[in-house]
Image (cartoon, rainbow, N blue to C red):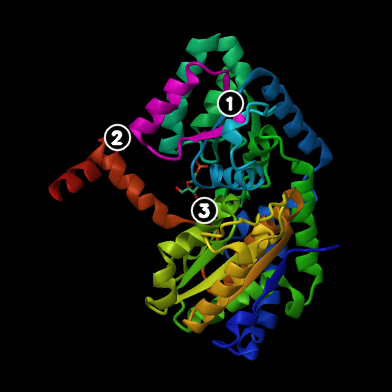
Amino acid sequence: MEHIKLSIDKTLTFVDREEIFQYKEESKKHLTALHAGTGKGNEYTGWVNLPSQITAAELKDIQDTANNLKERIEVLVVIGIGGSYLGAKAVNDALANNFDMLQADNENPLVLYAGQNISEDYLYELMEILENIEFGICVISKSGTTTEPALAFRLLKELLEEGVGKEEAKERIIAVTDESKGALRTLADQEGYKTFVIPDNVGGRFSVLTPVGLLPIAVAGHDITKLVEGAKAMQEFTVATEFEENPALLYAATRNVLYSKGKEIEILANYNPKLHNIAEWWKQLYGESEGKENKGIFPASVDLTSDLHSMGQYIQEGQRNIFETVLSIAKTKYKVVIPKDKDNLDKLNFLAGKRVDEVNKMAELGTQLAHVDGGVPNIRIELPELNEFYIGELLYFFEIACGVSGYILDVNPFDQPGVEAYKSNMFALLEKPGFEEETKKIKERL
Ligand SMILES: O=P(O)(O)OC[C@H]1O[C@](O)(CO)[C@@H](O)[C@@H]1O
């Protein structure tokens, strides 16, 4: 079976293979600890075996719920923030037609997102559109108490109930949350919504292969069974494969060696706009997992070749504290051949007869060589093609590599204590009951 491929060859003018290979035993130990649940933050390692544990009955329940929604609605609004929406958006955008919104014959509901910001204009414009559309809501929050999604849900629930009545709204609202805790669980039980559970031992950023990601992906019409199969294939591959050929262990080790040499920023680059939100998901995964105790690689991303005309200058000649990881798709879905032009005013006839993808691939190779020459080590990840199976492999690959990498860095990759600071300031400023002391203190600083 073909898998996604990792190449570290273009880091080897910056680091020795031996420096990477010295992590062989350590990274294997960390992989074992993740599977055995014996490492730091082990109460949140339930995602490690998710792909092999998810049952056909669970997938069917998700698919049936998606099918039921599809019969009632034209738009599904996924309400969630961070890990409660980024995975679904990443997969949906990777697999959808680039111009999905304009496709009149789309038989699947359009998936939109809310609760991932607190912009009044965003919510106003969304509600304005939804007023004339048959819509449903999938509200997702593991804690069930996060302000952004709770606020959006309060508004959209009211809009939906006003539009179709409380009974029909109940059929169109699905809640994904904790089994027993949190305000969303209480509300969902009280209102009688269909619910799915985010397991206690799976943190938000590792939850894409639970109903958090799978339900919105199924509603958008993508094959969740194939997605899980891909993740399972990568789970098995990473367990069975020796370090030298193991993409996850090699990626974790290589990025840590680069980091130890001052390469503090990793840029995830793609050459296909459909992968833009894979990078957004990846940024939360690595940023929240590793950025703590004053340590961690800063995860950034670019869309190429677009950003070669904006960020390209910096990557080529700016501070030499970056390395790049390139996501490449071997085979396109469609074929577009460049035509010959009799006047050739644009001087592009030398490309006539070639596929657009050949140009894209040469841009990719040329950029990689230029960046390496400019002092930017390059890692390359190749997907044979963009489909559910290989996206599933990619998601699991990044997750398991993240766990190993976090352990090499010697942090707990599964907590995110730093996220609370802004929340407590915001509540103090908004004078939330219970924050009286904080309110007094923060007001003195203004
Ligand atoms: O699903 P929840 O509990 O609403 O959390 C959403 C996001 O907020 C965070 O907890 C950070 O505040 C992320 O880790 C998480 O993905």
At label 1, the amino acid type is: Val
Q: What secondary structure is found at the residue carrying circle 2? A: loop
Vertical placement of residue 25 versus 238, above or below? below
* Crowding at mark 1 (Cα within 10 Å: few <14, some 14-19, many 20+): many
Q: Which residue is mark 1?
A: 75
- Which label number is shown at residue 268? none
Residue 19, percent across and down? Answer: 61, 88
Q: Which residue is mark 2?
A: 432
Which of 193 and 268 lies nearest the eye of the viewer?
A: 268
User: Residue at position x 57%, y 88% from top?
Assistant: 13
Marks 2 and 3, how far apart at CA = 31 Å
Q: Earlier in the sequence, mark 2 or mark 3?
A: 3
Q: Which residue is mark 3?
A: 280
Q: Earlier in the sequence, mark 2 or mark 1?
A: 1
Q: Classify the position of the N terminus by image quarter.
A: bottom right
Check if residue 131 falls in the magenta segment. yes
